[in-house]
Image (spheres, rainbow, N blue to C red):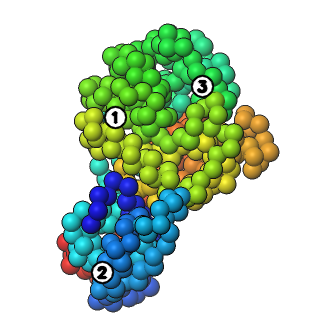
Amino acid sequence: MSKLSAVRARVLSAVSRDEVVAELYARGADAAAVSAVVAGGLGRAMLVGPLPLAEAQTLRKAAAGAGAKAVLSRPAGRADPARAEVVVIATDSQLSALAEALGGELGPRLQGALDGFLRPARRLLRCREHMLALGEKTLVMGVVNLTPDSFSGDGVSDAAAAIAQGKRMVEEGADLLDVGGESTRPGAAPVALEEELTRVLPVVDGLTREVSVPISIDTYKSAVAKAALANGASIVNDISGLRADEDMARTAADAGAAVVVMHIQGTPRDMQKDPRYADVIGEIGDYLEEGIGIAEAAGIARDRVVIDPGIGFGKTLEHNLEILRRLREFRCLGCPVLVGPSRKAMIGAILDLPVEHRVEGTAATVALAIQAGADIVRVHDVKEMARVARVADAIVRTEHAPPPGSEHKWAHQREQD
């Protein structure tokens, strides 16, 4: 197989296996029948590619050998007549068999994409001395804006007030705080380095002393990140996905910080002028995967990388809605997913409401993002969204088990283990 740096492996649709199994048990199916269903698996559609035409044909034949179906297609957004993408339609077990048969580099990529999609790992996100548990619940990131021109209308200019706001957010349920000193709203002009430092450093220092949760610095400038990290920050949230400043990834790596790799098309000043995509999910996924590669090349391990598809950053309303509908697909990249729909213009466009009246719309997007696989939600209204997340988690993150008193012992899991 060819070099895979630009090859996608992404599940396109899903049915929750554990919920189906629990339903079968609840309806009295015996363990042998349930094991047979799980062994056959539930259907998936996985997109792989683009690959050179000969390799795409090889993959199609291998899929047939695994009992799956495969269809060749042109790579969306990639004008290359010598390459093709392959959509493999198969059960879980067939996809795993195909991955094993392929081996090499491509096989593990397919299996990793399937595993990431189906089973978000319960693991730790390492942020310097902090360890954030992922998978047990949705983490809530509170936004502390130190900008007079914030789109959300919550910017503060006084360090003491910002520190008090951060403390209140932690009391309301924030698991981490994101401090920013430059507005990235559509059309925003850059802020001078010294001004950004003046805004954020006292707040980062004060919050580090006052709260126990990790502090994230929202910046694309390595000098700001370096100073904030020296003052106690442990995460760098870069809207450019580590592209705007070539020293950013190394700065975070040297400090042992975690990074949020976000997607953006353009810059805040021009990103909303005319955003266009041939394949919005695929192109965002490519950008994020490249950002993960930048992080790893600088020495940042994957257990310190978070990805963010960038709601509102170079996207139309339709793009944003598609991202939220298909958010789970980004889990195929193998990193925790952060999403930030809070108070965004997309909510205003749907409800025809100003920013101060978008809390219910934010709640809807947060709940659905959690259902679609978000690990972290970045919000302004912490108290309300922490409650939304708690209820959504009770629905989404419930462990499915046989009914009390059932004799079924999840035989299919024992067989797999």
Q: In the image, residue 49 lies at what x, y percent? A: 40, 65
Tell me: residue 365, above or below residue 69.
Answer: above
Looking at the rendered structure, the kind of residue marked 3 is Ser
Q: Do we see residue 140 in this rendering?
A: no
Q: Residues within 10 Å of mark 3 (few under 14, many from 20)?
A: many
- Closer to us: 389 or 264: 264
Q: In the image, residue 394 lies at what x, y percent? A: 48, 56
- Closer to us: 140 or 40: 40
- Closer to us: 346 or 153: 346
Q: Which mark is residue 258?
A: 1
Quadrant position of residue 118? bottom left
Horizontal side, residue 67 vs residue 280: left or right = left
Nearest to the eye among marks 3 and 2: give it: 2
Residue beneath label 2, please? 62
Cβ–Cβ under 8 Å for marks 2 and 1: no
**Residue located 67% across and 48% down the image:** 316
Nearest to the eye among marks 2 and 1: give it: 2
**Residue located 74% across and 38% down the image:** 357
Horizontal side, residue 91 vs residue 368: left or right = left
**Residue located 67% across and 29% down the image:** 187
Q: Residue furthest right?
A: 352
Mark 2 / mark 1, whichever is N-terminal:
2
Q: CA distance from mark 2 to mark 1?
A: 39 Å
The secondary element bearing badge 3 is classed as: loop
Q: In the image, residue 365 lies at what x, y percent? A: 61, 50
Looking at the rendered structure, the kind of residue marked 2 is Ala
Quadrant position of residue 89? bottom left
Q: Do we see residue 2 in this rendering?
A: yes
